[in-house]
């Protein structure tokens, strides 16, 4: 009895941790909620009759992330972008060379421009990667950090407007009226999105389970489209999470009481035997 109740306490405690993390990140742009999945811990058969095996509690089998689309919220920033559909924005590492940098992935598209003209994530400073725009509007080549300096003629103050179309092409219009395409946002997808590893907040890393990244551009080959001036909110429903928290708390309290009762019964038995 005590072992069974203990597994219940441990499982409920882990579920509460998952739910608390969801609630803590309910306002984190691009965050994806997680849910715990549990399995029955079966014990040895008590006799030879079928259907009378006695379970030994529950255990957390896996924490599964929900990759469902979050709500889109319009902002006042032209450097906010959201993905509608499949894929992730691809980010590099600050200061790393293109060939050596580790990529990370996120649905959060809150960008800013550094003093060197690089487009980076507003919070982490990681450069967002893009694919070069070739002649004739074609896109190809190796993904690299997006820098606006050359397109701006070496002077960022000359940039009048920045536009990002549904296909992810970043363009600037200079004060002299010249319009230049800079790069197309690099969008990544994976064979198994559930295999991505959470790095914190809305950022993820590729693993052997997720498979390698498949780089492409928005609006092509099943990739989602880009919406400028919007962000994707966390797919966390506060009401649902609060109800789950109440259920987990009740499960925790019930198993804790069972554990306490078992402990008192054991203590009483020991006292009786030692008299």
Image (spheres, helix red, strand yellow):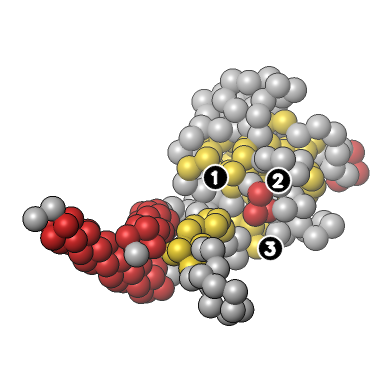
Q: Which residue is mark 3?
A: 85
Q: Position of residue 270 (x, y in %)?
A: 18, 55
The answer to whether marks 3 and 2 mark residues whose Cβ atoms lie closer than 8 Å is no
Q: Which quadrant, please, contains the N terminus? A: bottom left
* Residue visible at 76% across and 57% down in the picture: 223
Q: Where the C terminus falls, by quadrant?
A: bottom left
Label 3 to label 1, Cα distance in Å? 20 Å
- Mark 1: secondary structure: strand
- Specify which label sits upstream in the sequence, 2 or 1: 1
Which element carries disc 3, helix, strand or loop? loop
The x and y percentages for residue 121 are 53, 39
Q: Is disc 2 placed on a helix, strand or loop?
A: loop
Q: Image quadrant of residue 137?
A: top right
Observer-nearest of 222 and 16: 16
Residue neighbourhood size for the residue with mark 2, other residues' Cα within 10 Å, grouped as few (<14), some (14–19), many (≥20):
some
**Whether residue 89 can be seen here:** yes
- Say left or right for 16 vs 69: left
Q: Residue furthest right?
A: 136
Mark 3 or 1, nearer chain start: 3
Position of residue 83 relative to residue 239, above or below, is above
255 and 105: which is toward the camera: 255
The Cα–Cα distance between marks 2 and 1, rounded to whole angstroms, is 13 Å
Per the image, the residue denoted by label 2 is 209
Nearer the viewer's eye, disc 3 or disc 1?
1
């Amino acid at each position: 009895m005590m072992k069974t109740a203990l597994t219940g306490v441990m499982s409920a405690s882990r579920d509460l941790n998952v739910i608390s993390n969801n609630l803590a990140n309910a306002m984190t742009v691009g965050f994806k909620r997680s849910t715990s999945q549990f399995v029955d811990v079966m014990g040895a058969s008590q006799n030879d009759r079928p259907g009378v095996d006695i379970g030994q509690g529950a255990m957390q089998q896996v924490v599964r992330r929900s990759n469902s689309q979050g709500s889109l919220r319009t902002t006042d920033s032209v450097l906010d972008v959201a993905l509608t559909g499949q894929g992730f924005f691809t980010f590099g590492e600050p200061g790393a060379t293109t060939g050596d940098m580790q990529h990370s992935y996120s649905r959060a598209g809150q960008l800013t421009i550094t003093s060197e003209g690089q487009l980076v994530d507003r919070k982490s400073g990681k450069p967002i990667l893009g694919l070069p725009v070739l002649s004739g509007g074609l896109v190809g080549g190796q993904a690299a950090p997006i820098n606006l300096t050359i397109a701006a003629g070496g002077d960022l103050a000359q940039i009048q407007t920045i536009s990002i179309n549904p296909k992810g092409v970043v363009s600037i219009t200079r004060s002299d009226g010249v319009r230049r395409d800079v790069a197309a946002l690099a969008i990544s997808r994976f064979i198994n999105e559930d295999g991505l590893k959470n790095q914190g907040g809305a950022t993820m890393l590729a693993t052997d389970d997720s498979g390698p990244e498949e780089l492409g551009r928005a609006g092509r080959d099943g990739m989602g489209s880009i919406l400028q001036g919007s962000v994707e909110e966390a797919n966390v429903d506060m009401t649902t999470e609060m109800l789950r928290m109440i259920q987990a708390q009740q499960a925790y309290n019930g198993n804790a009481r069972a554990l306490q009762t078992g402990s008192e019964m054991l203590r009483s038995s020991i006292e009786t035997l030692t008299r």
